């Protein structure tokens, strides 16, 4: 490992890796297409056959989705010996929420690609769409989904069209290839023995149970994948694992140790270090935090009760003041005392809310509405209290 890279690890400056970066690497993309599309025509695809044209079509559509990729694939040695272009549209959905408009988004890309192909062929005198023998290139739409929720988005366009069953004959009929990451086990992913499948296996880890499964995989197979990875892909693997360790709250120093070993292509005690992400301890900490939060809410409720009681007493005192002019002097003194008590209680309530917010979210804005609602002040007064006691 170079001194520069080692220094970056020491400082914790590992590049953030998302799926766009992974799919932008043509070696990984080729592995993905060979392993998971199930198309024989792609079983021998290599990185030299792949061209990234995402930016071109996003400019045409006037959109910029970080998780979308469009690849132009050069399919060679087909029946007539020609070099046939093929397009892969991949929408990478790595959020937990299902995107219900994905089929329409795919259609937009597909029509844009076909239109551009038609114009290009005509301008280069290679074909004319008006001719009988003109053919548009095939497009394979893929949705790569990492969420754990069941994928319930429509698989056909007709399901997104009002009265789609009635007008089915007039609605474009196509589906897409759904590759659901959580539909594979770690063993099934690792069986491919390549870096892309290893990255997918890392991205499966979203819970304590997932981490346990990940740490029980065949370590010799993982070492073989690490040994065979290029420097560029090794950096992507390191970035992905770093993201995982930070997500699982692994101590930074231990995470840096893992990165140093991985950067030297030595697994060593790497898996043992990963075990330091003590999920049981995290669960205990979470339970304790929930208990503290419940106790804090109980104290807040008590404070709100005292405030209500003070306000009720204040209301009663005001009634007595209007009914009994003869005891005006005594009542005024009592009223003043209660108002001071009410103001003090309001401040205490505001301080309780502010302390809870600082401890559990740290976001001032979320405390404003809570203070405003709890002690019955205006937004401006609530903001003033936040600034005073934060």
Image (cartoon, rainbow, N blue to C red):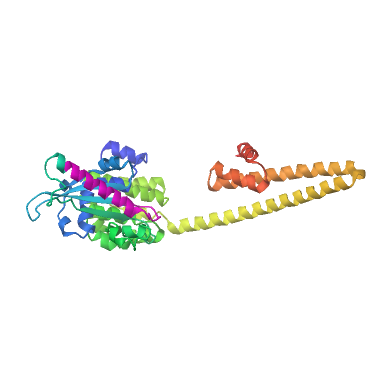
Q: Residue at the far left: name it.
A: 81
Q: Quadrant of the N terminus?
A: top left
233 lies left or right of 152: left
Query: Magenta part of the protein: which range?
Result: 92-120
Where is residue 323 drawn, in percent x and y? 88, 48
- Main SS, magenta region, reads helix
Viewer-proximal residue among 11 and 316: 316
Where is residue 40 drawn, in percent x and y? 16, 59
**Residue at the image point whose x is 32% and y is 37% from the top:** 7
Where is residue 111 drawn, in percent x and y? 26, 49
State whether residue 320 is above or below residue 173.
Answer: above
Task: Answer yes or no: is residue 290 visible.
Answer: yes
160 lies left or right of 192: right
245 lies left or right of 90: right
Viewer-proximal residue among 168 and 147: 168
Task: Answer yes or no: is residue 264 visible.
Answer: no
**Residue at the image point whose x is 8% and y is 50% from the top:** 82
Q: Quadrant of the C terminus?
A: top right
Q: Quadrant of residue 384?
A: top right
- Looking at the rendered structure, the number of numbered marks drawn on it comes to 0
Query: Residue 107 in magenta?
Result: yes
Viewer-proximal residue among 307 and 201: 307
Query: Residue 16 in magenta?
Result: no
32 lies left or right of 322: left
Where is residue 41 drawn, in percent x and y? 15, 57
């Amino acid at each position: 490992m170079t001194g520069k890279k080692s220094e970056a690890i020491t400082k914790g400056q590992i590049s953030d890796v998302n799926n766009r970066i992974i799919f932008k690497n043509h070696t990984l993309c080729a592995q993905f297409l060979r392993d998971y599309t199930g198309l024989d025509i792609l079983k021998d695809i290599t990185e030299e056959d792949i061209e990234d044209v995402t930016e071109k079509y996003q400019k045409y559509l006037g959109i910029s989705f970080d998780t979308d990729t469009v690849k132009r694939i050069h399919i060679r040695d087909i029946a007539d010996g020609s070099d046939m272009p093929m397009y892969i549209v991949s929408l990478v959905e790595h959020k937990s929420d299902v995107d219900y408009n994905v089929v329409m988004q795919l259609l937009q890309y597909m029509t844009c690609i076909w239109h551009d192909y038609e114009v290009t062929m005509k301008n280069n005198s290679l074909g004319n769409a008006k001719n009988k023998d003109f053919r548009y290139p095939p497009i394979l739409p893929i949705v790569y989904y990492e969420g754990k929720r069941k994928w319930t988005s429509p698989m056909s366009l007709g399901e997104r069209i009002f009265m789609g069953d009635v007008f089915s004959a007039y609605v474009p009929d196509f589906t897409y290839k759904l590759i659901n990451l959580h539909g594979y086990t770690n063993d099934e992913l690792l069986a491919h023995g390549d870096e892309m499948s290893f990255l997918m296996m890392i991205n499966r880890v979203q819970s304590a149970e997932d981490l346990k499964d990940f740490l029980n995989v065949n370590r010799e197979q993982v070492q073989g994948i690490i040994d065979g990875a290029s420097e560029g892909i090794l950096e992507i693997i390191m970035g992905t694992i770093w993201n995982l360790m930070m997500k699982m709250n692994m101590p930074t120093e231990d995470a840096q140790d893992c990165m140093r070993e991985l950067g030297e292509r030595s697994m060593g005690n790497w898996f043992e270090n990963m075990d330091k992400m003590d999920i049981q301890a995290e669960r205990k900490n979470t339970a304790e935090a929930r208990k503290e939060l419940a106790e804090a809410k109980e104290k807040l409720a008590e404070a709100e009760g005292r405030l209500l009681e003070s306000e009720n007493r204040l209301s009663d005192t005001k009634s007595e003041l209007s009914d009994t002019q003869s005891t005006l002097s005594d009542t005024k003194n009592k009223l003043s005392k209660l108002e001071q008590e009410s103001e003090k209680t309001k401040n205490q309530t505001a301080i309780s809310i502010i302390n809870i917010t600082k401890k559990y979210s740290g976001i001032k804005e979320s405390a404003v509405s809570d203070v405003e609602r709890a002690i019955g002040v205006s937004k401006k007064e609530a903001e003033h209290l936040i600034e005073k006691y934060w």
